[in-house]
Amino acid sequence: MKHSIQEQVLIELRRILRATQLGARTLARESGMTTSQLVALQILNAHGEMTARQIAESMHLKQATVTSLLDRLQERGWITRRRGEQDRRRVHVQLSPEGRRQLVRAPQSLQERFLSQFESLQPWEQSSILATLQRVAHLLDAASIDASPVLDVGRIDRAADDTSE
């Protein structure tokens, strides 16, 4: 059966949504973490000790969201927090040894696979994909929805086993 162009577009959109859901589910099953938690751990691994504000800026998220995300990582023993010596209001976050082990064991995320392939494209093709996705977001009345550059589903600060929105 041949699909109309409208049906083909909807099929491809559904494939993207399903790939994101399945990627998040696979990561959670294999590592016990969400894509957002993995990204936070990767940022800490790359930059060393950081404040919650710096992590929030790196992930393009609100500090309250990152604080909740960090709470979950600390509960798992994957990060440590300590108050600043000069400014006790400042909290420094770093990857724990267990967090480093978790990063080594974690499978490559859908986001990492996508970015690796996307970066290999020619600049004109990257721009074309971006323009098309921006147009699709507009067509879905989603252009004004706040979103961070994390390919994940559900709440950013959810537990890995939480499937609710």
Image (cartoon, helix red, strand yellow):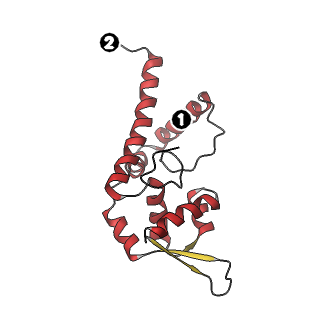
- The tally of labels here is 2
Q: What residue type is labelled 1?
A: Leu
Question: Secondary structure beneath disc 1?
Answer: helix
Q: Which amino acid does label 2 sit on?
A: Met
Q: The N terminus lies in which quarter of the figure?
A: top left
Q: Which residue is drawn at 37% across and 58% down?
A: 32
Q: How would you rate the neighbour count of disc 1 (Cα within 10 Å): few for under 14, some for 14-19, many for 20 or more?
A: few
Left of 50 or right of it: where is 163?
Answer: left
Q: Which mark is residue 7?
A: none
- Asked if 126 appears above or below 35 in the picture, the reply is above
Kindly identify the residue that appears in the image at 65 percent across and 77 percent down. Answer: 90
Determine which residue is flagged by label 2. Answer: 1
Q: Is residue 94 above or below residue 157?
A: below
- Residue identified by numbered label 1: 133
Where residue 123 appears, as percent x and y from the top left, is 48, 44
Residue drawn at (47%, 59%), measured in percent from left and top? 37
Please indicate whether residue 29 sits to the left or right of residue 67 in the image.
left
Element carrying mark 2 = loop
